[in-house]
Image: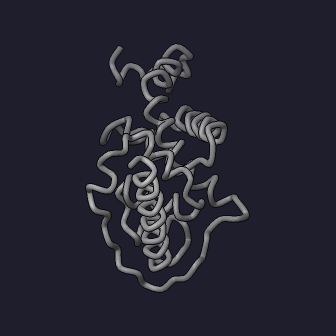
Amino acid sequence: MSEADLIKGCIEENRDCQREVFRRYAGKMMVVCQRYARHHMEAEDLLQEAFIKVFDHVADFSFKGSFEGWIRRIVINTALKQYAKKSFQNEYIGIEYLPESPMEPSVYAQLNEEELLQLIAELPEGYRVVFNLYAIEGYSHKEIADLLNIQESTSRSQLVKARKQLQARIEALQKIAV
């Protein structure tokens, strides 16, 4: 069945089409959810909530751009709304400007994707969200500031601090491995 047929079936609330859309995209979207969630159960909840929104609003898909990208945007926005609801929301640890310095490629070249994602998942909430939005999703600091209702300098600061924590943890792992 083509993607267009699946979308049409979902608009008509055909359960088989909805099941197939979920089967095709849930795995990729679960990875996105895991980057924003504190644990696996929270990621599952985010995924479920996001797909409910997908099916509720599938008629709004305009066939401009990819359907997967449209679903991904809903998943990210669902995760950000969940993040905004939390009382421990943003970690305002200073809004001073800190330069963004990249890690040396050799530092993380030996880690596999799963290990790196686990290290990212262990970051404090605010650091993890900013790191995911900037480094993985490709948002600018201005966009992040608008999404999270923070200053651009806070986004930069949290990104730098997230990178420093990641680098320290990676270096610690390398010392253990040697």
| Residue placed furthest toward the front | 178
The reply, left or right, for residue 178 in relation to residue 95 is left
| Residue appearing at x 36%, y 13% in the figure | 1
Asked if residue 5 is positioned above or below residue 82 in the image, the reply reads above
Comparing 96 with 79, the one in front is 96
Q: Where is residue 82 in the image (x, y as percent from the top left)?
A: 64, 52
| Residue placed furthest toward the left | 105
Quadrant hosting residue 105:
bottom left
Asked if residue 99 is positioned above or below residue 55 in the image, the reply reads below
| Residue appearing at x 33%, y 52% in the figure | 108
| Residue appearing at x 51%, y 35% in the figure | 30
Comparing 102 with 72, the one in front is 102
The reply, left or right, for residue 18 in relation to residue 111 is right
Q: Position of residue 89 (x, y in %)?
A: 65, 65
Quadrant hosting residue 43:
top right
State the scheme by which the image is colored: one colour
Q: Position of residue 161 (x, y in %)?
A: 47, 70
Count how many numbered circles sit on residues in the image: 0
Q: Where is residue 59 in the image (x, y as percent from the top left)?
A: 48, 34
| Residue placed furthest toward the right | 87
Asked if residue 38 is positioned above or below residue 29 in the image, the reply reads below
